[in-house]
Amino acid sequence: MRNILSETICVCAAACVLTFATGCQTDHQSSAQPTPAATQTSAPPPTTTAAPAVPTAATKAAPIRIKTGVTEGFTDKSGNAWLPDQGFADGETIQRPDLTIANAADPRIYQAERYSMTKFTHALPNGKYTVKLHFCETFEGISGPGERVFSFNVQGREFKDFDVWAKTGGSQRAYIETVPVEITGGQLVITFTPSIENPEINGIEIIPQD
């Protein structure tokens, strides 16, 4: 009985020794495993800042052409587009499409008019412009100089006692008054003042200067 007990104790002791040794070997192997290499992270590409855009010259404003007395625009023989009647504070309009007009590159500019007006305005960027006022005496009630006289003011420049007949030498003859102006308040202003009969005008061109 004692021998059996002694053998049992020896077997148990041996098992414990073996288990301990195995555990130590396992821990040693685990600790000996190589550490994974660190992952190399690529540096972000350098940020490039775009150079500021070089400002370019502003686009030149297009000419503005207004055909008085009509409700639809048209393109003249030179390829210029004309807007229909606009910008006037008051007045009346009339068309005389069958008239023959002398001294005119395109008679249509003078075959309609606005008359009895007092003011014209048009918003514009500040700058220098050439304003062209188109006139033609087409009213059958005017038969000579001095029968239609009026004054007009273009952006502060005064034209006193203007007589279309006297300027052209007769009826149905085109005349253009060219006025250089400088806009400083964002608006072109033209005023008309009657003296004898009513003021009349056949067209207005507003052309930006270089």
Image (cartoon, helix red, strand yellow):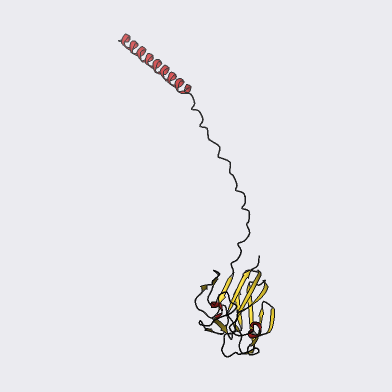
Residue 149 coordinates in the image, percent (x, y): 65, 87
**Residue extending furthest top?**
3
Residue 118 coordinates in the image, percent (x, y): 61, 84
Q: Is residue 123 visible?
A: no
Residue 6 lies in quadrant: top left
- Residue displayed at 36% across by 12% down: 10
**Nearer the observer, 158 or 76:** 76
Residue 2 coordinates in the image, percent (x, y): 32, 10
Q: Is residue 110 visible?
A: yes
Residue 179 lies in quadrant: bottom right
Tell me the quarter of the image containing the N terminus: top left
Residue 24 lies in quadrant: top left
- Residue displayed at 40% across by 15% down: 17
Residue 49 coordinates in the image, percent (x, y): 60, 47
Can you say whether 125 is above or below 164 in the image?
A: above
Tell me the quarter of the image containing the C terminus: bottom right
Q: Is residue 36 left or right of residue 91?
A: left
- Residue displayed at 45% across by 23% down: 30
